[in-house]
Image (spheres, rainbow, N blue to C red):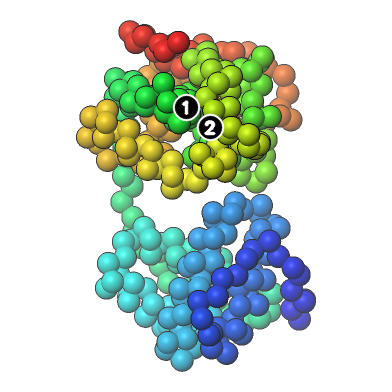
Amino acid sequence: MATALKSTVYTRTSGGKESAAREAADPALQRFLDAVWMERGLSANTLAAYRADLTALARWLEEHDSALLKATRIDLLGFIAARVEGGSRPRSTARQLSSFRRFFRFMVREGLIPLDPTAQIAMPKIGRSLPKSLTEAEVDSLLEAPTVADPLGHRDRTMLEVLYATGLRVSELVSLKHNQVNMNQGVIRVVGKGNRERLIPLGEEAVKWVEQFMQGPRVEILLERQTDYLFPTRRGDRMTRQAFWHIIKRYSKKAGVDKELSPHTLRHAFATHLLNHGADLRVGPKPLSAPPDNEDQASPRQTASIPHIQRRPGKGRAT
């Protein structure tokens, strides 16, 4: 029998008067989100994607006189067909179907439904495309696009330098707090997926930019305001992933980079250029609980010594 729902970290938004079917579906959906959050330690973005996918399905089912816990295989195929006719791509369809699988399997496990309606639905085939990357010359042009004499431009340059030097996820970059940065050791401490902590070397060049930013431009941006976030907005808030995406687009246009970029492009470039300089990507940044370095493990000092992270050749550096 289902247990009573506990209070949750998620906030529901109301889109107007909801029908009884939607109201009845909400507890099951919320119970599922609570469970995967507690059991898997999923990020807020992943949980939001689950919620969006399942809410879209619930609305479609309601329009067709059904509900989440009454959905059949035919219902789900109808929803998928409607999405495809509306222009949904195979990758989006596969993501939604994956969300549905996890939800209905959880419902079966909890004894709320007898059968999983997704069991006999095949995942769509998705062609695997290689991520777009940048040449080292293009990265240099992009990094030099911000006007560093302006405090916000200096912030943007520092963020791009840190992103390129570390391979951080964009969500990790915008959430970075100043107490996560150890300037003496030249490393940052990041809590990633599954609440796992890891140390990541910054490299000489990124350390220099962070030091310069914290000593002057960051103070000018904040004025009298206080925040723990390393890269605040003009209002003193944490920057959003979407805002950083607009920053990348603006500077790529200014730098004359014609490739279609995403917030993850510099992360892909980081990995590609590491390989070009002989690094082994199988040896990544270590969790804080990892044992001391030995001959088979790359230390932050070894990783930071790769030329393009420590100092890109042939380019003058801002003072």
User: What element does badge 2 sit on?
Assistant: helix
Q: Nearer the viewer, residue 104 or 33?
A: 33
Disc 2 residue type? Ile
Instruction: Indicate whether 114 appears above or below 272.
Output: below
Give the class, few, some or many, for how many residues have Cα within 10 Å of label 2's Cα (few <14, many ≥20). some
Name the residue tied to disc 2.
221
Residue 189 visible in the picture: no
- The amino acid type of the residue labelled 1 equals Pro
**Residue 216 location (% of width, % of height):** 55, 21
Q: How many marks?
A: 2
Q: Secondary structure at mark 1?
A: helix
* Of the pair 217 and 196, the residue shown nearer to us: 217
Give the x, y percent position of residue 292. Answer: 72, 19
The quarter in which the N terminus is drawn is bottom right
Q: What label does residue 151 carry, if any?
A: 1
Relative horizontal placement of residue 108, taking residue 270 as reference (left or right)? right
On the image, the x and y values in percent for residue 124 come to 36, 63
What's the residue at 39%, 77% (across, down)?
79
Q: Residue at x 38, y 61 (%)?
A: 92
Q: Residue drawn at (54%, 42%), measured in percent from left and top? A: 235
